[in-house]
Image (cartoon, grey):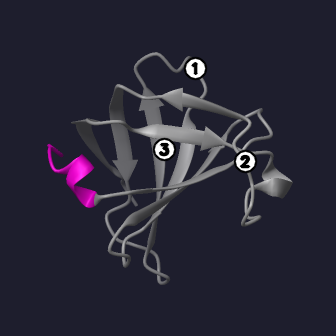
Amino acid sequence: MEWKTYFFKVTGSTYLHYFRQNEAMALDAKPKDQIFIKRISSVEIPPEAPKNGNFVFEVHHSAGGSSPWILSADSEQEYIVFSFMKELANCFVCKKFKPSFFAQICP
């Protein structure tokens, strides 16, 4: 099954907050670090969503080095909920974004 690749820019104040993996789901969890993302160079999206309605993205950042970031998005929510895990790093983030952030998606 081939994956489609889309290119887009992230606009606005788009912050990803890092948590230790075992603390990420705690209601009172505080971020340990954060990164401001100006641009994501590409995202690979499978042609069809899995049965649970979620997509998994492999995101290659323009200044992100060789390791991709893996994100998942629940396509059935009013807001897109991203879960984040970077390879070789024990971190996790959950953040809500309005779909309008990704209005400029071009195949």
Residue at the image point whose x is 25% and y is 48% from the top: 101
Residue at the image point whose x is 70% and y is 36% from the top: 87
Mark 2 or mark 1: whose residue is earlier in sequence: 2
Q: Residues within 10 Å of mark 1 (few under 14, many from 20)?
A: few
Tell me where residue 80 sits by quadrant: bottom left
Task: Give the label, 3 or 2, closer to the camera.
Answer: 2
Tell me where residue 26 sits by quadrant: bottom right
Q: Read off the residue under disc 2.
A: 30
Task: Give the label, 2 or 1, closer to the camera.
Answer: 2
Q: Is 82 left or right of 67, judged from the image as shown?
A: left
Q: Read off the residue under disc 1.
A: 66
Q: Vertical placement of 72 versus 76: above or below?
A: above
Q: Position of residue 28 (x, y in %)?
A: 74, 60
Q: Is 53 left or right of 65, judged from the image as shown?
A: left
Looking at the image, which residue sits at the far front? Answer: 28
Q: Read off the residue under disc 3.
A: 58
Q: Position of residue 9 (x, y in %)?
A: 25, 33
**Amino acid under disc 1:** Ser
Q: Position of residue 70 (x, y in %)?
A: 56, 46
> Do callouts 1 and 3 mark residues in contact (Cβ within 8 Å)?
no
> Do callouts 3 and 2 mark residues in contact (Cβ within 8 Å)?
no
Q: Vertical placement of 63 versus 89: above or below?
A: above
The N terminus appears in which quarter of the rendering?
A: bottom left
For the residues marked 3 and 2, what is the alpha-carbon distance in whole angstroms? 26 Å
Please provide the residue range marked out in magenta: 99-107
Callout 2: SS:
loop
**Amino acid under disc 2:** Lys
**Amino acid under disc 3:** Glu
Residue at the image point whose x is 38% and y is 60% from the top: 46
In the image, residue 41 lies in the stretch drawn in magenta = no
Mark 1 or mark 3: whose residue is earlier in sequence: 3
Callout 1: SS:
loop
